[in-house]
Amino acid sequence: MTPAAALSALEAAADAQKGVEMAAYHKVSRVYLGVANPQLDAFAKDWRAEMDVEERVALAGDLWATDIHEARVLAAKLLTQARLRPSDASAWALIKDWVPEFDAWAIADHACMAGQKRLVWDPARLADIEHWHRSEHIWTRRAALVITLPWTKQNFPKPQDLEIRDTVLGWAATYVEDHSWFIQKAVAWWLRELSKHDPNRVRRFLDAYGAALKPFAVKEAARKLV
C-alpha cells in the first residue's frame, strides 16, 4: 500500500457534508474528509494484513504528515496492535514523535491508544515519557495520562503495576491546579477508571487534592466510587 493509494482510498470514501460537520465539531483547522470511523477500522485491518511492521510504520508516518484528520487517525490505527514483531522500536519512536504535534483530542486519543500497546509491551518505556507531565504543551501533558490508562484497569496488578499507578498519580497531582478543561477532564478520566479497580487509591488522591480540582472533575472522578 503506497501513500498515494492510501489517500485515494480515503478520498473515495469521503462524505463532504460529514466532513463539514466534523470540522465544526473538532474546531481545529485541517482537512476533514468525512470518513466514518468503522471505515477507517476496515482500512487499518486490511492494510495491516498486507504489510510488515516497517512498511506500516512508513505508511503511518506518511499519512500523519498529510495533516488530514482521517489520515492521522488511520496512521495511529495502523500501529494499534498488541504485538509488532520482530521489533516495535520504530513504531514507538514514531508515536513519540507525533506527540508534540497533538492539537485535538480525537487524533491525540487514537495515537495514545497505539502508544498504550507499546507501553504495555515494554513498561520500561515509561522512562521515555516521564518528562511529558512537565511539558508546556497542554496536549503532551494530557497524553501522559491518556497513554498510561492501561494501568488503571488491572484487577490483579503486580507490584510493578502498583508502582506505576503511584507514579502516574504523582504526575496527576501536579495537574490539579491547572484548570484547563482538557487537563481536568484527563485527571478525572484516569481517576474514574482507576476507581473501578483500586478505589482506595482514588479516595486518597481526592482527599489530598480534591479541593484543588474543578468541581466537575471531582464529580467525574468519584462517579464509580461506592
Image (cartoon, helix red, strand yellow):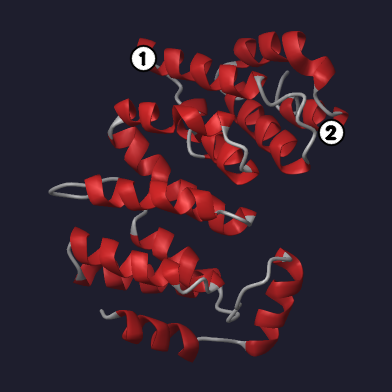
Q: Is residue 213 left or right of residue 45?
A: right
**Residue 204: where, in percent of width, then height?**
68, 8
Amino acid bearing label 1: Gln
Amino acid bearing label 2: Phe
**Residue 110: where, in percent of width, then height?**
50, 54
Residue density around tag 1, few if under 14, some if 14–19, many if 20 or more, within 10 Å: few
Q: Is the C terminus in the top left, top right, bottom left or bottom right quadrant?
A: top right
Instruction: Pick whichever, 112 or 127, lies toward us.
Output: 127
Q: Is residue 168 left or right of residue 47?
A: right
What residue do we see at 84% from left, 16% from top?
Answer: 211
Q: Which quadrant of the structure image shows residue 181?
A: top right
Q: Is residue 32 above or below residue 53?
A: below
* Tag of residue 216: 2
What residue do we see at 69% from left, 73% from top?
Answer: 22
- Residue underneath mark 1: 160
Q: Is residue 191 above or below residue 49?
A: above
What residue do we see at 46% from left, 74% from top?
Answer: 66
* Residue 158 visible in the displayed image: no
Q: Is residue 156 above or below residue 38?
A: above
Give SS at disc 1: helix
Extreme residue toward the front, this view? 136
* Residue 171 visible in the displayed image: yes
Q: Is the N terminus in the top left, top right, bottom left or bottom right quadrant?
A: bottom left
Residue density around tag 2, few if under 14, some if 14–19, many if 20 or more, within 10 Å: few
**Residue 98: where, in percent of width, then height?**
45, 53
Q: Is residue 40 left or right of residue 170?
A: left
Q: Which quadrant of the structure image shows residue 65?
A: bottom left
- Circle 2/circle 1 CB separation < 8 Å: no
Extreme residue toward the left, this view? 86
**Residue 96: where, in percent of width, then height?**
40, 46
Q: Earlier in the sequence, mark 2 or mark 1?
A: 1
